[in-house]
Amino acid sequence: MAIILDGKKEAKKIRMELKEKISGLKEKPGLAVIMVGDNPASKVYVNNKEKDCKEIGFYSEIHKLPEKTTETEIIDLIDKLNNNKKIHGIIVQLPLPKHLNSTKITNLILPEKDVDGFTFVNLGKLLTNTPGLIACTPKGCMHFIKLTGESIEGKNAVVIGRSNIVGKPMAILLMHANATVTICHSKTKNLSEITSKADILVAAIGKEKFIKSEMVKQGAIVIDVGMNIDKNGKLCGDVDFESVEKKASFITPVPGGVGPMTRAILMQNTYEAFLNFQNMKG
């Protein structure tokens, strides 16, 4: 039976460490969240981020904008936040309504305030292994993998999914840690053959319980990034947890795994951005 990597417990530990680090500071790290429209999932995420800021003692601003907000209005708001000295991190909650260009809007955030790690500058820094702000979910997944105490070097790592937010940065981080990395996606042939050789398997495809035990190597580390609703209306991952848990050495649950860790890493990135600004001030 696999050891369950508890995201809630680990995230709480990270928040407590951050709370301690900023307790004596006059100026606090500041995070601004921009949310456009009424997406129910986005509302939950944004409320949780606000709650995390409060718990740690960060300064936070939530900008809830109506669905019909124009690109110009968002550009003006980002410009104000870029120039606001109380704000060290800015995130635009995705998805945005269809009439808005999320790539263009995301890249208006100053790279040093891009705590989601989505701008071309920070993605370029990640690619070239240059210090920068790293996307929260892949960074959180790496935190889990390191928690196992297993060496990553020389291991076969398989990432299922090739998005710019999770799949690609995840593969790059594993490469930087000297794993041998394979990226699989919807066009991959003989998927089971590839996944069953993985010492580290990261599933980020958005298909409920897609990864079955026969697709997993005995003793593998399994990280489940998926967030799906099953036919009973319950939250589940991309991994069939019940069957895979018997075969893996370590596994993240859904809920309570990658989700809470991603939020904690966002707070960590905000603190990191804050420190960078303090250093620039000298």
Image (cartoon, grey):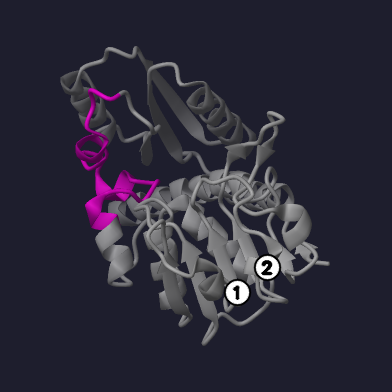
Indicate the amino acid at tag 1. Answer: Ser
Could you tell me if residue 24 is visible in this image?
Answer: no
Q: Which residue is mark 1?
A: 196
Q: Is residue 40 left or right of residue 125?
A: right
Q: Which residue is mark 2?
A: 214
In this rendered view, identify the residue nearer to me: 58 or 51.
51
Q: Magenta segment: does it hold 210?
A: no
Identify the residue shown where x is 55% and y is 62%. Answer: 202
Return the x and y of residue 59 as percentages of the image width and height. 48, 32
Pointer 2 or 1: first along the chain:
1
| Image quadrant where residue 87 sits | top left
Return the x and y of residue 225 as percentages of the image width and height. 56, 51
| Secondary structure at numbered mark 2 | helix
Q: Is residue 102 left or right of residue 188?
A: left
Instruction: Read off the magenta span.
Output: 98-122
Could you tell me if residue 241 is visible in this image?
Answer: yes
In the image as oriented, which residue stretches furthest toward the left? 72
Q: Quadrant of the C terminus?
A: bottom left
Q: Magenta segment: does it hold 101?
A: yes
Return the x and y of residue 111 as percentages of the image width and height. 27, 49
Identify the residue shown where x is 46% and y is 21%. Answer: 39
In this rendered view, identify the residue nearer to me: 199 or 32.
199
Say if 48 sits above or below 154 in the image. above
